[in-house]
Image (cartoon, rainbow, N blue to C red):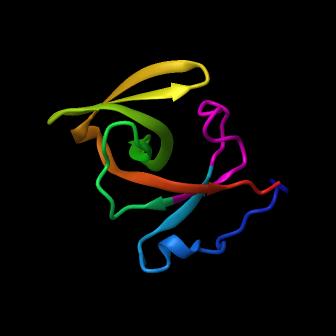
Amino acid sequence: VQKKMFTHCVKPDYLIGVPSAYACFMLSNNMEQRYFHGEILYVDPTLEVKENDFVVIQIMITNKLVGIIRKVSEISERQYKVITLNPENKEVFKNSDITAIHKIVGSRSVY
């Protein structure tokens, strides 16, 4: 963005009543056509995730919690099937490997 970190941004009106809402940056190009590198994504962790939703999947990688942005293509009792858009790529995450999965409800370009 400007090679500076910041910890706060303006909460959009539609998230004012959601104290657990958060924002994150899109840090790759793999969801282009929907979200672009550098955009701020607004997330509502209180909403139910459904097929075709764009989500932040929180998983542990080498003892570090990370969030990855994907589109949900299928949900079952045991797993989530998700895709990236650029290039289109399918992945499967077992429910037991997911720390949390939260629905993206908006975005804002910082340019």
The C terminus lies in quadrant: bottom right
Q: How many marks?
A: 0
Q: Is residue 61 above or below residue 42?
A: above
Q: Position of residue 38 (x, y in %)?
A: 72, 48
Q: Position of residue 81 (x, y in %)?
A: 33, 28
The answer to whether residue 12 is left or right of residue 92 is right
- Find residue 48 and report its image quarter: bottom left
Q: Is residue 35 magenta?
A: yes
Residue in view at x 59 percent, y 19 percent: 87
Q: Position of residue 21 (x, y in %)?
A: 46, 69
Instruction: Compare residues 100 and 37 and report the one nearer the observer.
Output: 37
Residue in view at x 61 percent, y 30 percent: 30
The answer to whether residue 54 is left or right of residue 41 is left
Residue in view at x 65 percent, y 75 percent: 10
Q: Is residue 38 magenta?
A: yes
Instruction: Compare residues 33 and 37 and report the one nearer the observer.
Output: 33
Q: Position of residue 32 (x, y in %)?
A: 65, 33
Q: Residue furthest front?
A: 14
Instruction: Compare residues 56 and 11 and report the one nearer the observer.
Output: 11
Boundaries of the magenta span: 26-42
Q: Is residue 89 above or below residue 95?
A: above
- Find residue 11 and report its image quarter: bottom right
Is the magenta region chiefly helix, strand or loop? loop
